[in-house]
Amino acid sequence: MSRVNTKRENKELFVIPERCKECGFCIEFCPMQVLRKSPEINSKGYHPVYIDDIDKCTKCDICGMVCPAFAIGVINTEKKPVELSEGCKSG
Ligand code: SF4
Ligand code: SF4
């Protein structure tokens, strides 16, 4: 999995090339048109998506919303572990 930090420091765009099925939805719907099909082939025989111009990516996560394979998207790197209340703890 590749992760790339762009302007919004607490968010990262990720791509998992092995999951990509080359449907092209993310390329079509990316408002910044920064995604391309790679000339490489993954183990399933598809050309996976890669990010061509990361500086233009706004981390809107539209690519993540339209990808049926969960192969691309934006993650929040600032998420903190949830504190369990006393009632939820076991033992
Ligand atoms: S996060 Fe938004 S701008 Fe960045 S690649 Fe995905 S759809 Fe395009
Ligand atoms: S939407 Fe997902 S499966 Fe389709 S080309 Fe983009 S990354 Fe690959």
Image (cartoon, rainbow, N blue to C red):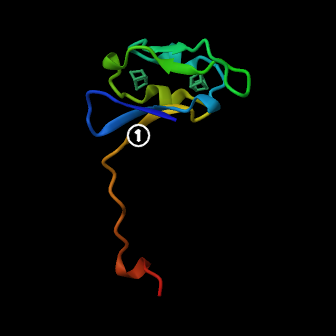
In the depicted structure, whether residue 26 falls above or below residue 89: above
Residue at the bottom extreme of this rendering: 91
Report the residue marked by disc 1.
75
Q: Which of the two residues, 62 or 21, is positioned nearer the viewer here?
A: 21
Amino acid tagged 1: Ile
In the depicted structure, whether residue 50 falls above or below residue 18: above
Within-10-Å neighbours for mark 1: few <14, some 14–19, many 20+: some
x%, y% of residue 50? 51, 20
In the depicted structure, whether residue 18 falls above or below residue 30: below
Residue at (47, 88) in percent of width and height: 91
x%, y% of residue 19? 63, 32
Residue at (43, 77) in percent of width and height: 88
Residue at (56, 29) in percent of width and height: 67
Query: In the picture, residue 33 is in which quadrant?
Result: top left
Q: Quadrant of ligand 1?
A: top left
Mark 1 CB within 8 Å of ligand 1: no
Image label count: 1
Query: In the picture, residue 77 is in which quadrant?
Result: top left
Q: Tell me the element at label 1.
A: strand
Q: Is 2 placed left or right of 8 in the picture?
A: right
x%, y% of residue 85? 35, 75
x%, y% of residue 81? 36, 61
Q: Is 84 placed left or right of 36 in the picture?
A: left
